Amino acid sequence: MEDAGGENVEEPLQEVDEQYKASLPKRMGEDQAHRDPSRWWFASAAFPMVAGTLGPVASAFSICALVRPWRQNYTKGADIDTATFIKDPAWLIAINAVQLAIALSSNLALLLNMTRRLRFSIAQPVTIVGWYLSSICLIALASTTAGPLRPGNDDFIWSQAYFYGIYAAVLYFVVASLMVVTVWGSQKGHYEKDFMLTPSQRTLMLQTISFLIYLLIGALIFSNTEGWNYLDGVYWAAVTLFTVGFGDQNPTSTLGRALLFPYSLVGIISLGLVIGSIRSLMLERGRRRLDARIVEKLRHRVLRKMAKKGKDGILTPIRNANSDSPELPSSSGLTEFERRQSEFELMRKIQKQAAHRHRWIAMAISTSTWLVLWLVGAKIFMECERQYQQWTYFDAFYMSYVSLTTIGYGDITPMSNAGKSFWVFWALLALPTMTVLISNAGDTIVKGIKDATDKVATVTILPSERGFKSEFKAAFNALSHGKLFTEDIEESPPGILGDSQRHRYSSEEGDDEGELARDQADLDAEGANTGPRKQKQAKNARDEESHKRRVEGNAAAEGDSGDRPDRTVRFDDSSTTSGKKGSNGRSKKMGNTDDEENPYDKSSNSTSQLPRMTRAVSIPRQDLPQIPTDPAEYHLTLIEEIGRVTQHLKSHPPRKYTFQEWACYLRLIGEDESDAAKHRKPHAHLRRSKDELEGKERAKWSWVGSRSPLMSSQEEAEWILERLIETLDDELRGVKAARRKDGMKNRTG
């Protein structure tokens, strides 16, 4: 239909419908994080972070390699502090200065790229080429110094500057190679030409640069104040700021001791910020992505095992006998809602096993890294100090341990130029590793001890609300792997369900019934220790009363609706295409079966048939709240739930929703867990699973399938919030289009 001006009045509505249909696959999660191999996360995020951290460290070592000559005169048996420097050739100093300038330019390019001030395509070639050139220059200078520039007699030693040059060359080569992998992955299209970093992680490089500058300037100030060699000052600053405090070097002047107070305080805080950011990289940024990969592998293993044993019937959607679908009706006696709940619980078990496995894998990796740094570092320290202090391996082993743990007794410390410079290089790697190890130990070993202690306490002197007898039976049930006391224990549901039951009666401020329910819950909690039987009776009574109120409310609402047809929220393509041409697709989403009635039409007699859903997420029952059929009430419900889920984002640890909560939210965005039209059986084979998104049934999904919301790399609250906002946006666009259509009709009329 066209208006007087020749404009098609159906185009706005058709555009909204097309946008809605295009968003269907996206809304149920096209998140492919679990499909991408972990190596691409390392290439796109971890490698740039490592380069951004070690690149400035290499430049700091380059500065140390430039400020002092590379050779010293030394007589065996003499005090190494009295060794005099042998002047380097001018060309060696010039090349050293040029490579430092190139390296600093490379670091600046990477920093500007991380802060999005310089494009990826420009910054990365500058960074990679510059670091490789610096590495080549330092290797050439070190080789020349050890060859043609080597003195004719043996009465000389390499200075700390020489060893710092070698460490810088190695670091430049490593970080440049890592960035080559990052650029190659972006060129192959595995990720965008940008770093997948959070704002806080983008500042890690700046934090590292600031800390290193602070350390080097402090070394300069204290070396002049105390009369130390500058590179000895660098060693002292590292020992001080890392809180090891050997005591082999310490300020003796009044000025030096006075300056120590602010210098150490600010430096230790700065180091804490850097290590905290590194910990965030290792433990938080990669956790979701790596968790998704572990869950994906475990999910396929479970599905293959179930298919092999013929126990995958629970994964087949239960359809009507009249359905055209190849799946047959279920003979298990379960409804589709109950089957989906079983599927959901299976996925929760997979997630739990994957999280447990991930924690111990992280613990094993951090422990292995720490042990390598400890054992290999001890071997290098022994070789460095053998000529000067005749260290055994155990001496170096002991010194490395008291350094790693920052005990720092100071009875055994490095004395040689190689030993002191290597300690600075080694400590910059080892101490953050120690921090990560302690954090992983807190998630595994310490957590296990804490849980065991809590369990012992609950069955002895600190029984929980369930009472001593119930806790005692629960403990034996767990020890017997569920074979003892299976019928006598009323177990708390896993995850957030227990919490949702405890808060079942929470409602908005000013709700008198909610206040009475909370008061009753408080009284029941106070009397919980009088016996689990009374508590169970009180709980059942509360459930009966709550259910009665909901049934009465629904019945009253249905009575008010008259003969109006029931509206149910659907989420399929038919909801936007069925009906007479020109009908509003958004009204179909609301489930309106009357083609002539437009829920967004101001002239419509549509009224709210059901009471507004409140606290839907706190009702752990299968009689889920129905969705308001009045558009205004539906929009208001979406807004309320968006606000509620926004608060859930603040939960720590991240909130895990129950199946009933998920069912409520899925209804709000157009999915019905009781309807098998959008459900499918997951594929047990990886190749077929990868082809799921290319088939005709793209919108169908399973809780244990690759497109499950639980497989997303997002937190559950983030996933739900994003879909609620998309749904509200679609609804409001529909309102806008409908009003535009009404205006055009009025003008043509």
Image (spheres, helix red, strand yellow):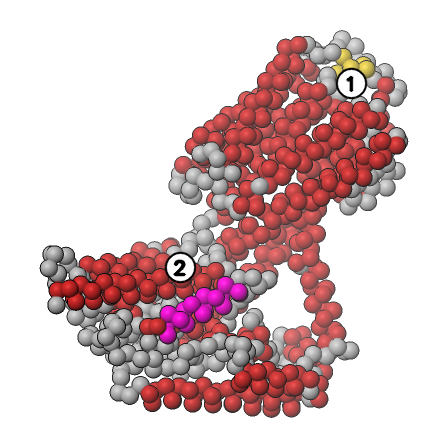
> How crowded is the residue under tag 1: few (<14 C-alpha within 10 Å), some, or many (20+)?
many
Say whether disc 1 or disc 2 marks the residue closer to the N-terminus: 2
Query: Looking at the picture, how far across and down is residue 76, in whole percent?
Result: 86, 18
Query: Looking at the picture, how far across and down is residue 135, in whole percent?
Result: 59, 24
- Determine the residue positioned at 88% across, 38% down: 411
- Is residue 546 in view from this perspective? yes
Q: Secondary structure at mark 2?
A: loop
Report the magenta residues as a range: 633-648
Predominant secondary structure, magenta span = helix
- 398 left or right, relative to 663: right
**The disc labelled 2 sits on which kind of residue?**
Gly
> How crowded is the residue under tag 2: few (<14 C-alpha within 10 Å), some, or many (20+)?
many
**The disc labelled 1 sits on which kind of residue?**
Ile
Q: Which residue is nearer to you in this view: 145 or 59?
A: 59
Screen quadrant of the N terminus: bottom left
- Determine the residue positioned at 19% across, 71% down: 579
- Determine the residue positioned at 58% across, 74% down: 499
Residue 369 included in the magenta stretch of the image:
no
Q: Which residue is nearer to you in this view: 562 or 415?
A: 562
Query: Looking at the picture, how far across and down is residue 115, in whole percent?
Result: 51, 38
Q: Secondary structure at mark 1?
A: strand
- Is residue 140 in view from this perspective? no
Residue 157's tag is 1
Is residue 494 depicted above or below 351 in this figure? Answer: below
Is residue 706 depicted above or below 269 in this figure? Answer: below
Residue 113's tag is none
Query: Looking at the picture, how far across and down is residue 466, in whole percent?
Result: 66, 82
Q: Mark 1 near mark 2, Cβ–Cβ under 8 Å?
A: no
Give the mark count.
2
Q: Which residue is mark 2?
A: 29
What whole-number distance in Å separates the C-alpha atoms at marks 1 and 2? Answer: 64 Å
